[in-house]
Image (spheres, rainbow, N blue to C red):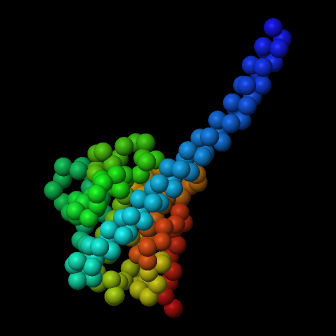
Amino acid sequence: MVEAIVTIAVVGLLFSIGLPAYNRMKSLARSSHCVSNLRQIGMVVNQYIAEHGMKLPEMVAAREDKNQDVPALDTVLRPYVNDEAFFWCPADHEHIHEKTGTSYFWNSALNGQDLAAIDFLGMSKNTAGIPLVADKENFHKNVGDEVNILYVDGHVSRELTFIIDP
């Protein structure tokens, strides 16, 4: 009887140690999937740009409901993707994507700009500091307090950085 109680206690201890680590690993995997989605969106935006005279698309930053008839990330770029899953973050537990069509914001301040002459808040030379698409919410709370952000140059980061041109 004592051996059974000790065994149950050891299993309970191992479970209490392992569960938080497992949950963190699961959160990191979802965040990595989200980063991959943003990179795919970046490639899709590049395809769009190539077909539209090197100009960025004109879209709303976000919409409240996917039934709104406005150009949005998931409608304008949909012809360039094989799977709508690119437009939702797997960590979006509130299912924002189901209501709005996507888990991501578009930087509408860049609408229609020529890629060669892009300007955002006076930043124009260094596209590594210009955000293009970002998570709508902090879906990755278990990973940190950041959101995933796709920048114009194609890299994705969890840190918001602005690089001011000299």
Return the residue found at the far top.
1
Give the residue at x 56% y 51%.
28
Count the numbered circles shown.
Answer: 0
Return the residue found at the far left.
69
Depicted 84 relative to depicted 131: above or below: above
Give the residue at x 53% y 63%.
158
Return the residue found at the far front.
82
Q: Position of residue 86 (x, y in %)?
A: 35, 56
Position of 66 with respect to 144 (left or right) is left
Q: Position of residue 37 (x, y in %)?
A: 41, 59
* Quadrant location, the N terminus: top right
Q: Position of residue 149 (x, y in %)?
A: 46, 65
Residue 72 visible somewhere in the drawing: no
Depicted 70 relative to depicted 114: above or below: above
Depicted 31 relative to depicted 45: above or below: above
Q: Position of residue 20 (x, y in %)?
A: 65, 39
Quarter where residue 131 is shown: bottom left
Give the residue at x 45% y 60%.
36
Return the residue found at the far bottom.
166
Position of 93 with respect to 60 (left or right) is right
Position of 55 with respect to 89 (left or right) is left
Residue 69 visible somewhere in the drawing: yes
